[in-house]
Image: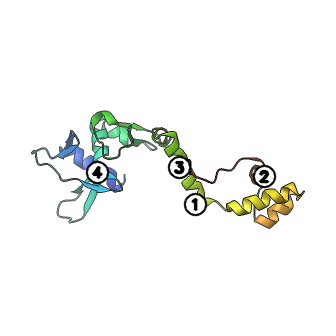
Amino acid sequence: MTKQQMALVIAINSGIHVVNGCVFRKDGYEYSQRLANGYKMIRIRIQKGNRKMTSVYTHRLVAAQKFGIDALMVDGIQVRHLDNDSTNNSHKNIAIGTAKDNANDKEPVTRMRCAMNASRKIRKLSDEQLIELRMLRNEGWSYSKLMDRFGVTSKGTMSWLCNHEYKTQELGA
């Protein structure tokens, strides 16, 4: 069990709960929430006498209340914000699902922007190199020669680069 999972279990078992997006202890004290990475969260101590605090995200507290703590402990399960507003922790906006479900909650344009951003980080050839590669292929260069020139190790990848549309610009750019 991770430290965050342990903190969530401790929070739920000690009576911490969420009402209308506000986090309360069982004695009625309202926690002040912080924003971290766009998500609201509280900080709790997971060991008495230890000064170290651990984060518990509000949306995970809501999901634990709604679906039960055990549902959140399953490998591969994520808490989803159905409207993609990470600060909207209303009961009806929270669901659980897989990473694929979570990604599919996003608008298609947002999904494409995220995919383009991720691919740009691992991309090996620039737009200029791709144009040069296709020009050389049209001049009759073999895949093997192109692979050596551009450092591509797979004929399948070379075929794909030569024969498929490769989006390099964000949508709307």
Q: Are marks 1 and 4 in contact (CB under 8 Å)?
A: no
Mark nearer the N terminus (3 vs 4)? 4
Mark nearer the N terminus (2 vs 3)? 3
Residue pointed to by mark 3: 113
Residue pointed to by mark 4: 40
Mark 3 → mark 4, Cα distance in angstroms: 24 Å
Mark 2 → mark 4, Cα distance in angstroms: 46 Å
Q: Nearer the viewer, mark 2 or mark 1?
A: 2
Residue pointed to by mark 2: 162
| Lateral position of residue 47 relative to residue 114, left or right | left
Residue drawn at (11%, 48%) of the image: 29
| Lateral position of residue 133 relative to residue 50, left or right | right
Residue drawn at (80%, 61%) of the image: 147
Q: Nearer the viewer, residue 138 or 8?
A: 138
The residue at the far front in this view is 173
Question: Crowding near pointer 3: few (<14 within 10 Å), some, many (20+)?
Answer: some
Residue 152 sits in quarter: bottom right
Q: Secondary structure at mark 2?
A: helix
Residue drawn at (38%, 38%) of the image: 83
